[in-house]
Every structure is written in structure tokens, then in C-alpha cells.
Amino acid sequence: MRIAVPNKGRLHDPSIDLLERAGLHLEGGADRKLYADTVDPDVTALFARAADIPEYVADGAAAVGITGLDQVRESGHDLVDLLDLEFGRCRLVVAAPEDGAISSVEALAGGTVATEFPRITREFFAERGVDADVVEVTGATELTPHVDMADAIVDITSTGTTLRVNRLAEIEEVLSSSVRLFARPDVVDDEKVQQLVTAFESVLAAEDRRYLMLNVAEDRLDDVRDVLPGMGGPTVMDVAGSDDVAVHAVVEERAVFGVINDLKAMGASDILVTEIERLVE
Ligand SMILES: Nc1ncnc2c1ncn2[C@@H]1O[C@H](COP(=O)(O)OP(=O)(O)OP(=O)(O)O)[C@@H](O)[C@H]1O
Ligand SMILES: O=P(O)(O)OC[C@H]1O[C@H](OP(=O)(O)OP(=O)(O)O)[C@H](O)[C@@H]1O
Ligand SMILES: [Mg+2]
């Protein structure tokens, strides 16, 4: 199975990182290559531009791909969104000059909109019944309203800095995007594809959990269980030559601070918190 992965730009490093953490180590690294074998003889990574990845998958060059939902939508291909990989979060928005006449989508009727996403933009305006002219650019979209090329833009925003610096105000959101694992409909049920989904899910599940270990007097075990609901309850083991028991549990990361305070109050000792690499539920 071939998996298409962004070859450069902001999505490259996190994509490689995810593959590695999922156990799909790339043989010989990913630098400046067109493809790389992985430790799994049945999985090869193929490197392409984020915007081209939906095309590679649709054409059959790869079975699955990693890229932004915005790119998948813009491609127009019928691809299945298998998993939200939870990075590359951004929004596609309609924006116009802060002090200009345009403050609604409807006000763009008869106007011009510049964008790197012509398909999504045309569909958006058609759905709203607003007849606007869509002009395709390949970068520096934020400049176009200031040089009379367009009345508004449809572009990516995340922190909002670029819009602000270019004195543009958001009018409406068109699409909320993040990076996804997606596939051609005909391969969705393939065993290898499902194994990949499980592997990625295990990395994502581990990210916001911690593994907690502690010793506590056996007669406080019920109290400890109350603060450690965990997954199917904690694992409890005898500690040789002691009245204490050792307790291991998986805890939500955001609960760790409070849980440790509760455990200390119950006389728990040797509390150890570690990261989890993968968690297959
Ligand atoms: N500011 C941002 N914050 C979060 N995600 C973003 C941002 N800009 C773009 N993205 C996501 O990253 C994807 C790739 O962005 P883009 O095509 O601009 O590539 P790049 O990483 O900037 O590299 P290059 O433009 O040099 O090819 C976008 O389709 C979008 O999903
Ligand atoms: O809301 P912000 O945090 O400012 O992010 C938005 C900017 O990020 C992207 O550009 P990028 O940095 O990828 O540069 P590029 O235009 O060269 O691709 C996007 O095209 C916006 O311009
Ligand atoms: Mg970019």
C-alpha cells in the first residue's frame, strides 16, 4: 500500500512525526526523496505537494493520503475522510478590507473574489445565491483587494495575523479544516488501510493521556479507585514485603494535576507519571 505524504511545507514534519510514532519508521529518512520504504514491507510512503495529494490518491498512485481537508475539497475528488489527524487546523474565510464597503457575503454580488481555492469559493457563492466573479491566484491573496484586483478574498486564516497585518476583516467562515487521513472509496475496507487507521488512532488516543503509577496502603484502595476511573479501572499489584499495593492507571492528561493531589491526600507514595506512546483501545 502506498501512502501519499506532504513533501515540504508546514504539513511535512508533523506528518512524518505521526508516521514514526505510529510505528511506521521510514527507512533512510524522508529528506528530498520521492518515496521511502517503511518498516512494514507492505507500506511505502510517497512524497508530494499537499495540494497534489488528493489527485495522487484519486488517480491510484497512492491508496491513502495525508493532507488538509481544504485540499481534498478543492480537488473535487470523491475521497473518504478516514481520520482527523488533529494538526494543520485552519479556516477558510471570506475577508474584505476593514474600512471598505463590503461587510457581508451578499454585498459581493457583482463583485470579484480572489482565492487559491476557486472550486470551494464558487460552490460557496453558488450555494448562497450570490453571483460573484472568482479570480484564481496562487499566493499573496491578501494583497489583491488593495490593488483593485478583487473586492474580497477567500483565504486560509489560523491566528488571524496575516489578515490583520493586511487590514482585512473576516466576513464569514467558508470551511473549517484540519489534516485528515483520507482514502479512495474502493480501498476503505482493505486490511492494511484499517491497520493504518488503528495505528494513527492509537497515537492520537495516547497524546492526551498519561500513565500513572503509585504505591498506596491496601485499605485505601477503594478511595484510590474513586479518583482513578481510568479505562476499565486501574491495575493493582501486591508489593513484596509490604502492606502497600502498586496501582497503575491511564489518566486524562488534564486530570493529572488534580488526581495527584487527591492521591497524596490518601497517603499514596512513589507517584510516577509518564507519557504513553500508543494506546490501542
Ligand atoms: N496558517 C496555517 N495554519 C494552519 N494550517 C495551515 C495554515 N496555512 C495552511 N495550512 C494548511 O496547510 C496546507 C498546506 O499549506 P500550503 O499549501 O500553503 O503549503 P505550505 O506548507 O505553506 O507550503 P508551500 O506553500 O510552500 O507549498 C493547507 O492546505 C492547509 O490545510
Ligand atoms: O492567520 P495566520 O496565522 O496569519 O495564517 C494564515 C496564513 O498562513 C498561510 O500562509 P503561509 O504561512 O503558509 O504562507 P504561504 O502563503 O507562502 O503559503 C495562509 O495562506 C495565510 O496567509
Ligand atoms: Mg502556505
Image: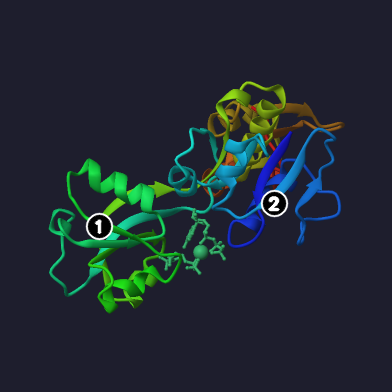
* Disc 2 residue crowd, few under 14, some 14–19, many 20+, Cα 10 Å: many
- Residue at x 55%, y 43% (from the top left corner): 54
Q: Which residue is mark 2?
A: 47
- Residue at x 28%, y 78% (from the top left corner): 147
Quadrant for residue 29, please give it: bottom right
Q: Is residue 278 left or right of residue 158?
A: right
Q: Specify whether residue 270 is in view.
A: no
Q: Which residue is mark 1?
A: 133
Residue 189 locus on image (x, y percent): 62, 21
Q: Which type of secondary structure does the marked residue at label 1 adopt?
A: strand
Amino acid type, residue under disc 2 in the picture:
Phe
Distance (Cα) linking label 2 and label 1 = 34 Å
How many marks the image carries: the answer is 2
Q: Is residue 149 left or right of residue 24?
A: left
Q: Which type of secondary structure does the marked residue at label 2 adopt?
A: strand
* Disc 1 residue crowd, few under 14, some 14–19, many 20+, Cα 10 Å: some
Amino acid type, residue under disc 1 in the picture:
Asp
Quadrant for the N terminus in the image: top right
Residue 104 versus residue 278 in the image, above or below: below
- Residue at x 67%, y 22% (from the top left corner): 190
Residue 181 locus on image (x, y percent): 58, 39
Sequence-wise first label, 2 or 1:
2
The tag on residue 146 is none
Residue 102 versus residue 38 in the image, above or below: below
- Which colour style is shown? rainbow
User: In front: 241, or 160?
Assistant: 160
User: In front: 10, or 105?
Assistant: 105
Residue 32 versus residue 38 in the image, above or below: below
